[in-house]
Amino acid sequence: MDLFLLYQYFVTAALLIVLVNFIINNALFKSTTNFLLPGSIKKAKPLVSILIPARNEEKNIKRCVRSLLKQDYSNIEILVLDDNSSDNTAKVVRELEKKDSRVKLITGKPLKNGWLGKSYACHQLSKHANGDYFIFTDADTLHFEKSVSNAISCLIVNKLDALSVYPMQIMVTLHERMLITFISFAILSFIPLVLIKKSKYPLFCTAIGQFMLFKKEVYEKIGGHQSVKKAILDDVKISKQVKRCGYKFMIFDGSRDVYCRMYRSFKEAIRGYSKVIFAAFDFHIYMQAVVTLMISILFLFPFILLPLGALVYDWPAVVINLIILQIIIILIIKAILAIRFKSRILDVFLHPLSILYIISVSINSVLQSKLGPGIYWKGRIYDARDRDDLKLVRDNHE
């Protein structure tokens, strides 16, 4: 029992550290609405290029572009690249193009060897962009009228070279709510945000491709998306490239400026997370296994051990109290996240189910990449058996 008690002290201490980091991060994760556009920018209004890669996005692209056309920052160009879609994406954009000269459709070239789809689409977009600032955003985002001006304000006021804005994630089904909430949970719990801004070390950096802003000259000097052309997590990798090249980067809470519904079905959610989880560990099975075990120990086992210790094995009060403290810490973190991002409070108590979802998808990501058909996304399948050389093996349309 002495070793088991020591184990409980270790888990409790680790969770207290996570809680402290989480509280600090909540203060550092500034909302994009906190910053005002400097007068000099209001007067000069440099051109902002909004770049949207779109593959089979006819259901989303009209809403996205129309929301961007309503921005209070008017000096924009909106470039949409039709990435070899099989639906009516191009037709929808052409109709918008006729109504507003700021919209331009670009027909994407066939995917080149050595590139992954989204990176190649973003690379092509950058070659057509004329702005002083580049905003890359996804076709399934919805922008409120200040999303562009607030992002530019964040960049300039904080003296940054690039940034990423985290949208409000719209979650409808149980599967979405159990999986997608883990993004904000992981970022605010595990990553010291102060090191993203202050440290020059690329390890301490992350981003989300739903909204990324670069100074044009910085984007070009870091090599743009060509520098991450084989990366599944192109957004995270390019943020690290910014730091690697000596530039300043930070992430912001854009939940009041941008909405996004990442997945609309269980199948989409599983595919999406299976695509990114193994890639997050650079396809190292052992590293992923260790992290998955640690997440289980910290965030799942307390919910299993409490009923076992209290109802089955009659463990000492000190052990039970430590496990209860662990659960309280976890629920405090989840409750704060639910309040901040306006998710369902009742889902806080489904946290163990959320972790089981993540563990299951983590295992599936390895099986799919190493034993299955490969990494699937947007009708394309990439062979991930050689982690240093991802190859396109099939390019079908969804």
Image (cartoon, rainbow, N blue to C red):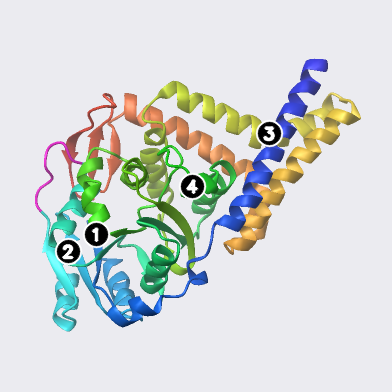
Residue appearing at x 44%, y 66% in the figure: 157
Q: Magenta stretch: give its range.
A: 109-115
Residue 96 quadrant: bottom left
Q: What residue is shown with label 2?
A: 129
Q: What residue is shown with label 1?
A: 216
What type is the residue that disc 2 sits on? Answer: Ala
- From the top left corner, tell me how far across and down residue 361 is, in percent: 46, 37
Of labels 2 and 1, the one closer to you: 1
Of labels 3 and 1, the one closer to you: 1
Q: Is residue 111 one of those drawn in magenta?
A: yes
Of labels 1 and 4, the one closer to you: 4
Q: Is residue 60 above or below residue 386?
A: below
Question: In the displayed structure, does residue 397 sit left or right of residue 156?
Answer: left
Q: What residue is shown with label 3?
A: 14
Calculate the distance from the C-alpha at mark 3 to the C-alpha at mark 4: 24 Å
Is residue 85 visible to us here?
no
Q: Is residue 21 above or below residue 314?
A: below
Calculate the distance from the C-alpha at mark 1 to the C-alpha at mark 4: 22 Å
Image quarter (top left, top right, bottom left or bottom right) of the N terminus: top right
Contact (Cβ within 8 Å) of mark 2 with mark 1: yes
Residue 68 quadrant: bottom left
Q: Nearer the viewer, residue 328 or 88?
A: 328
- N-terminal label among 2 and 1: 2
- N-terminal label among 1 and 4: 4
Q: Nearer the viewer, residue 149 or 119?
A: 149
| Crowdedness near tag 4: few (<14), some (14–19) or many (≥20) residues, C-alpha within 10 Å | few
